[in-house]
Image (cartoon, grey):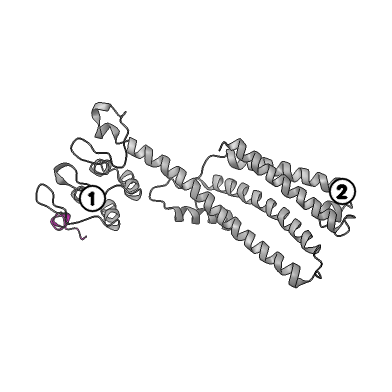
Amino acid sequence: MKKWKVQIALISLFCLIRIVDLHSTLLISPDLEHEQNWLVKIFGFGWPAMIMSSVISIIVFAIFLNLYISMPSVGPLKKNESFSDFVILFLKNNFFFVKTGDKRQKKLLLKGGYFLFIFSITAMSILAAVGNYLQLSPIIYTKLFVTYPLLIFNTVFLIIISLSILIFLGIEFKSISKKKLEEVLQSASDRMFPAEIGEAKVYLDSRSSDGDTALHIFIFANETENALILIENGIDINAIGDMGNTALHVALCQNNKAIIKALLDANARTDIMSEFGKTALDLARENGITI
């Protein structure tokens, strides 16, 4: 769905919430005697001010929504940064104001702030309307039937907001990861298919003429970050390439400890024999590496 359609849908929904809030206020307090809106409570303004405050809140909601949607993605782009690491960084920046020194800190604060403001203003509107409708109940307005339900509703809504933040982060992460993976794979094209001069599309299961995968290529070239990205995205780590070597064979020959660890953590086989009659265990022993 296009971004402008999403904005229109969300703004329309927020308008409906504001209308419901005003309607519930009209039913419970037509003279605004018990209204908590500061324009009414402090300055004594009437319904025109109530309606105007709703219009202003809709405009502010639309502005922040546009800022949020139009802002570029901010996700885990650093070497070996996991999704959980990124979530912790996000929470530190937005809730604990820890100076992490990360270049993305301002963007994280801005986008997280926009997101929380949008949900907060929506939550307040919904809570106000629910509180008004609860007071219309024929049951006596007591803590048992109004205050406690509101507290429960507020708690549930905060949980929903928290989950929404994580969902938003997950979408951002997946989007960036997919783009990053495609870029990484394509960077091996000219080496896997030299005749195509970098134009051939490379996939996780692509093989060069000698059987090497993009993972073999990156390990040979000591491009550790690219190799780790392929491992994380499920490339066949036991694929047999040139000379019968697996990715683990190549990593051991290159003595690349980061890739060796990543391959072993992904349960790479150590018993596959190359054309030289060597298994990964044999190479590890020869190179003094414990696996």
Q: How many marks?
A: 2
What is the quadrant of the N terminus in the image? top right
Q: CA distance from mark 1 to mark 2?
A: 71 Å
**Which residue is nearer to you in this view: 241 or 133?**
133
Instruction: Return the x and y of residue 103 as percentages of the image width and height.
Output: 49, 45
285 part of magenta stretch:
yes
Local SS, label 1 = loop
Q: What residue appears at the point 80 percent right and 51 percent down from the top-left corner?
A: 22
Instruction: Return the x and y of residue 25 as percentages of the image width and height.
Output: 82, 55
- The magenta segment: 280-291
Instruction: Return the x and y of residue 245 as percentages of the image width and height.
Output: 17, 47
Q: Which residue is mark 1?
A: 238
What is the quadrant of the C terminus in the image? bottom left
Amino acid type shown at disc 2: Trp
**Which residue is nearer to you in this view: 181 or 26?**
26
Q: Earlier in the sequence, mark 1 or mark 2?
A: 2
Q: Is residue 166 left or right of residue 62?
A: left
